[in-house]
Amino acid sequence: MLPEALEKELHRIIAAVPRPREAAVDVMYALQHHYGYLCDEAMHYAARVLGMTTLELESLATFYDYLYRQPVGRYVIHVCDSVVCWMFHQDSIFDYLCRTLGVPPGGTSEDGLFTVLPAACIGNCHNAPTMLINGRFYDRLTPERIEAVLAELRQGIEEPVRCK
Amino acid sequence: MPDLIIDGRAISVPKGTMVIEAAERLGIMIPRFCWHKALGAAGACRMCAVKFVAGPVKGLEMSCMTLAADGMVVETFHPEAVAFRRSIIELLMVNHPHDCPVCDEGGHCLLQDETISGNHVQRRFPGRKRTYLDQDLGPFVQHEMNRCIHCYRCARFYQDYCGYRDFGPMQNANRVYFGRFEDGPLENPFAGNLADLCPTGTLTDKPARYTSRRWDCERAPSVCLHCSLGCNVTVLSRYRRVARIEARDNEAVNGSFICDRGRFSAGYEAIPERPRAGLADGRPVPVTEAVAAAVSRLAALAESHGPGSIAVVGGLRSSLETQAALVALAGAAGWRAPAFFGSRQEQAATKAALAALTPARARSLAELGQADAVLVLGVSPLYDAPMLALALRQASRAGAKIIVADPRPVALPLPFSHLPVAPRQLPAVLAVATGQPDQAAAEAQKRLPFSPELWPVLEDAARALAAARRPALVFAPGLAASLPDDDRLGLFPVLPAAGSAGAALLAPDDAPGLDELAAGVAAGRIRGLLVAEADLFTAAPELAALLGSLDALVVLDHLPTPTVAAAKVFLPTATIFEAGGTLAASDGRLQTAAPVQPPGDPVVRDGRGSHPPRAYDRELPGTDPAPAAFWLGEISQGLGQKAPRSPLAAVMAGLPALAGIDCSRLPDAGLRPAFAGPRPDTAPPAPLVAEAGLAVVYDEALFATDDPGRYAPLALAQTAASPVILLHADDAASLGLADAMAVAVGCGDRFVPAVVRLSRAMARGVLVVPRLPEFAGLPPILGPCGLRRR
């Protein structure tokens, strides 16, 4: 059962567009926020309220980088893996993150806090090398800066969203 | 008409033609993957690049994405284009598993052809290949994603062309995956076409897997027998068994596709139960002896009781040759004309439906796909004639309004209005919908006073049909007498079986119905019956019940029907795969099926699963079956008749619509006779008054409700364990029945168990019953005691 407020919110999103399928990504995004990722239960619920098939939603969910069909950590680190960021790499930022957190690309750290994902340009080239964590940019990265960011995030006090 | 030059040859093509199509008209096959003539271009594969050296477009361009234009000079073998295509095929082959030796597509694989055409001969990429996990897509289509080259043909066919939404593309970039959300059977009843469409071995025909290489098969053009549309198919046979059926292009009928019923309902020709030997009084005899027995018994009966004591029954799954041979035999012997239909009324209605198809009004299936408003009456397209649903889908995609009036719940993969009316109200719906749109509201209220919910739908329908430029009417034969006399309105009848049109064309006007034969047998007037490729137990249960009282029962067939079991003399006939023949589609189109395999037990059974005996002087087992027309000719000769060399030509010469047509030389697209127009004397069938009970409406399923399909093991495996009957929820409430309740349906002197399902999308006062043999004896109106809880 979803919280009543979320159900209301979903119906509001759907009612705001001429055809329900136009709201598909927004509905899935809202459900992802609730569940932590798009579990099968979320996909079936979205299909029901949108009048679409689970296949159609899967086509969208697996196409977009910021919809997760597998469990992710509390912080999803989208590291820019594109030309400009490579040019400014002294060392590979991506490798450094994976090494520090002890995860393979796409993996989640043992404490469940961090997932590292490559992203093909996040549109922040003037601040390269860069990464995006839960909607926030981190610019001109160096290994020291990354350590500082990770330490800061580990101090976070919010209860992480957990998936069933 | 743009004029252009391709490879030094000039061609003029209609406006809107793509360069790849223009080249094809010159016989130049530009390499391609994503482009398909039914699906159009996607620009996904980049394989069809050609060089434009002069004209409005310059440089290297995709020929499937470029409209042919005046002054274009195209070089398909320009070094730049050749180099580009070589790189593309190398790229597409990077992840391909190169598993051709174990791939079913091998030998008829577009990817193999284009790899050669691109001259890609050496793998240079040293990296790892991308791999996928496959899905179980049900009994018909095999999934092998590693072979995929991402041309999107499957997804475009499945979702855009057919309108089903459970299969499609997922992921992105190099990881694109075509499949379902989870394992499970494909919902699309046209999914078998994926095997034809897929240019690689990603999606292949699952039942045919590992049975044969295409080049090892005997192949022949044939016509589908599993509904009345006459779709064109290619039959592939291996070791005297049909290995696979593929769609065969016919732009006027089925385009490039067929339905899964047509593709997966073969197999009845190879079942072990198939009767392959002559029988006399229950014991196997040489076929010559069986012919002699048939002749002597029929002659003796004619001698002792007169020619009126013999009746002939023809089937609705026979070729025109068989049907004509029956007509000729009965005519020459002075017997009454063969009965093909349940009643004279049914025969007259079918004849009238065909007669109405004047050249101005007849529409082909392809033309229905271009109509801009279609009214479908008494037909449930997806099940009565599946490819009709696909044609309507194409019309609907182009903006046509589709209205379906049928008592059954109707499912279609397109937006449509459904008028759930009882069969007796269909003429009223037809009259209102094709009448003046400004009077539609008043007429609807007058003619359908108890269905106010239908009035606005009917008004809409009348407006849409009046405003349309190419409106069409799809109708069941019972409505032939009510057709409006309006040349603007195209006509397309849907008949109950593949041989219905042939029987209606060839049967003399005075041919009796099966009901009359039953009365004749009961009264003792008829003492001998000759039945060719018909099962009386499904076609005429009252007649079947009286078979024991006959002096002579001669049966010709290739299916193990109960009528064959009751036969006193039996002659085994050849199936369409062995005999071929001419067939008439529901729009009267005459088409030829070629024989594909010799008769005889399939090799797999002859050798009991291993190699057949290596005795070369041995006769092949099971080779007695011959075309029914041949046996009928033998009987005719035995009776001392001077039979014409071709009974079909002789019978056709006597029919105004068919005279002068040579069935041995029909054009590739088939030939639609020019019918003269409806006869004025056709009376509409008397409407059933259903006050006393529920009107029985038969419903087809996708599989195994048609006559040969009922004996096909694969089709039979797709049917539900327990028959399901449908009832309107309000009718069920008044009868005290609930959804999913076990019931018994009164059928003559016995009760047939079934499960009742309730629906609100169907007509009131109607009981929808699957077309299964056990329900064959139901009365047209089921009385109050006919349906009870079990």
Image (cartoon, grey):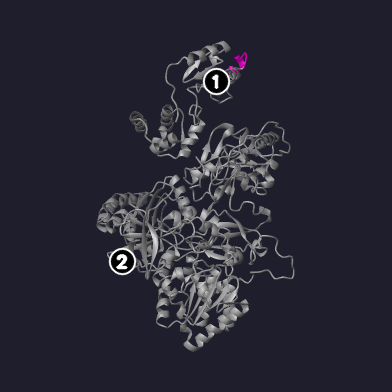
Task: Judge whether residue B15 is colored magenta.
Answer: no
Q: Does B472 appear above or below A58?
A: below
In the rendered image, residue B336, in percent from the top left (x then y), is placed at: 46, 79
Q: Which residue in the structure is indicated by mark 1?
A: A79
In the foreground, B562 or B590: B562
Q: Amino acid at mark 1?
A: Val
Viewer can see residue B253: no
Check disc 1: other Cα within 10 Å, few if <14, some if 14-19, many if 20+. many
Q: Does B251 appear above or below B170?
A: below
**Residues at marks 2 and 1 touching, judged by CB atoms closer than 8 Å:** no
Check disc 2: other Cα within 10 Å, few if <14, some if 14-19, many if 20+. some
Q: Quadrant of residue B746?
A: bottom left
Task: Judge whether residue A86 is colored magenta.
Answer: yes
In the foreground, B168 or B84: B168
Which chain letter goes with mark 1? A
Q: Amino acid at mark 2?
A: Gly
In the rendered image, residue B296, in percent from the top left (x then y), is placed at: 56, 84
- The magenta stretch is A85-91
Dot label at residue B783: 2
